[in-house]
Image: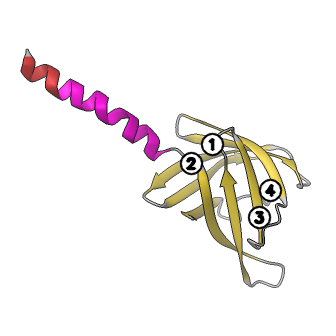
Amino acid sequence: MKILILPFIAIIAMLPLSLMAQNPVGTWKMSIPDEAGKMAPLKLSLLADGSYAIDFGADGTIEIKGKYTVEGGKMTIQDSEGSDCTEQGVYTLKIEGDTLTMTRVSDGCAGRGGPEGVMTMQRG
């Protein structure tokens, strides 16, 4: 019986680590094309209270604010300030090391997520 209990205890002990691995809270950076086609930095801050802030140009000015939820490997986002579109977007969420990948499932805001619907960011 002790032999069966040890693997079970090990799995339970590791469970918080696997859940933490999919926790997107933090600062994420990526580059997006600006109006002239040049790549410009973007900084996304995902806060523990379920809110986010987007800083286009990574210049310290927040252009868009919104709310997000994570459930079942999917993130639902909705801009609340600074955006012309306040529709919800649903994205699959994948975190590997310092890389966050969000892939569009559905989004009422046509421009969000780019033409391919995939956003890949680095922790930073």
Q: CA distance from mark 1 to mark 2?
A: 9 Å
Q: Quickly name the residue at label 4.
A: 110
Residue in the image at 22% along x and 24% along y: 8
Determine the residue located farthest toward the top in the rendered image: 1
Q: Amino acid at mark 3?
A: Asp
Q: Which residues are magenta?
A: 7-22
Q: Earlier in the sequence, mark 2 or mark 4?
A: 2
Q: Quadrant of residue 68?
A: top right
Q: Amino acid at mark 4?
A: Ala
Disc 1 + disc 2, Cβ < 8 Å: yes
Q: Quickly name the residue at label 2.
A: 24
Looking at the rendered image, the disc whose residue lies closer to the viewer, 3 or 4, is: 3
Quarter of the picture containing the N terminus is top left
Side of 81 where 17 appears, left or right: left
Q: How is the image coloured?
A: secondary structure
Q: Earlier in the sequence, mark 1 or mark 3?
A: 3
Structural crowding at the residue carrying mark 1, measured as other residues with C-alpha within 10 Å and reported as few (<14), some (14–19) or many (≥20): many
Q: Quickly name the residue at label 1.
A: 75
Q: Quickly name the residue at label 3.
A: 55
